[in-house]
Image: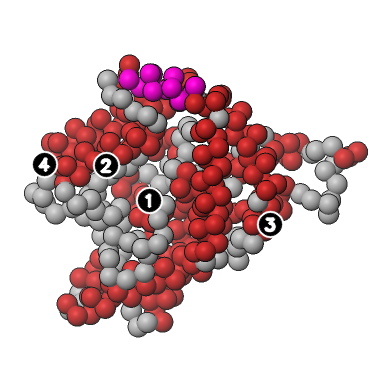
Amino acid sequence: MIARPDPRLLALLVVLLATALLAGCGGDDEPAGEGGTQTQAQQAQSDLDVEEQLGFTRNGITAAQAKVENAIAACMKAEGFEYVPSDPVAAQAALTGKPNMSDEEFERTYGHGIATLYGKGSAQSDPNARIRAQLGDADRRAYDRTLHGGDPQQTFAYAIDNGDFSELGGCTREATEDAFGGTRLLTTLQRELDELDEAILADTRVVRAQEAWSRCMRAATGEDFEDSEAVEETIRERLEQIVGEVLAPGQVAPEGSYDKAALAELARLEVEWTNKDLACEEEHIADAEDAVRREKEARFREDNAELLRQVRPLGS
């Protein structure tokens, strides 16, 4: 549970990279090494959990977003609209001042990026703001319908953050389906991975570790949190109380539309809580979860081998 994306991101990235993983895991085509033993490279790979092998990092998500952005641009062009593919690395640099941050560095600096990055979009982080602003009202509505079905919140970044792709529309939905082999496969994989997470969390060893984490967080923050997701949910709820409707990532907040002092205090609290969360996880959860995850993932690979073979790797 330490410094990695929300479990709802897993299904999306499995679609990108699982085929490469299966090839890397080997089969009957080549021997494991001299006398059937593993090579050092194979052993190093087997020491990683599924998430690490599949590249479940902030940089991995960035690569997925870049693929979708290019597909959106092609779709919009076919419909007669101009769309500049957003460069997620440049967007992150515009928001944080530093591209290619590691997961741990991002979380220790910005928490979960909820209050800390709220409303900090710019023309650089949204390269299509100028194009859309130059359109008349009717053309702008048509542009929005074509791009995302008419709901500006339903961006790829928003969907991946929330793990819900059902509300995507327009070229955004088409590009997402094209990149990941269709939403039906995506939904099936997400269900299987959700069940994997549930099995891990239900294991007695993890339950006891989670209870110790809760006690640690109560002592460190004075708050009662059931798990790390509860920390994020609390930040989101308090953000909504301050700003009202929460903007999609990268959108610019109107001036004077919220209490900036209250937002700054929430951002400070978000970073503080996230770092305490990481410390409590390292102390109480990491070892137990790693052991349980290794056991459950081995069975997961066996049970879902055929399903994983159906996925489309990144760049195919």
Secondary structure type for disc 1? helix
Are the two marked residues, 2 and 3, in contact with CB atoms closer than 8 angstroms? no
Q: Earlier in the sequence, mark 3 or mark 4?
A: 4
How far apart in space, not on screen, are marks 3 and 4 (Cα)? 52 Å
**In front: mark 2 or mark 4?**
2
Are the two marked residues, 3 and 1, in contact with CB atoms closer than 8 angstroms? no
The region drawn magenta spans 208-218
Horizontally, residue 238 falls left or right of residue 19, namely: left
Front residue of this view, candidates 193 and 204 = 204
Horizontally, residue 78 falls left or right of residue 21, namely: left
Front residue of this view, candidates 198 and 35 = 198
Mark 4 Cα within 10 Å, few/some/many (few <14, many 20+)? few
Measured as percent of width and height from the top left, residue 198 is found at 51, 39
Q: Determine which residue is flagged by label 1.
A: 162
Residue at image point 61% right, 42% down:
50
Label 3 is placed on what type of residue?
Answer: Glu
Label 2 is placed on what type of residue?
Answer: Arg
Mark 3 Cα within 10 Å, few/some/many (few <14, many 20+)? few
Res 259 label: 4
Q: Determine which residue is flagged by label 2.
A: 236
The colour scheme of the drawn protein is: secondary structure
Q: Determine which residue is flagged by label 3.
A: 306
Q: Quadrant of the C terminus?
A: bottom right
How far apart in space, not on screen, are marks 4 and 1 (Cα)? 25 Å
**In front: mark 2 or mark 3?**
3
Q: In this view, does 262 lie above or below 251?
A: above
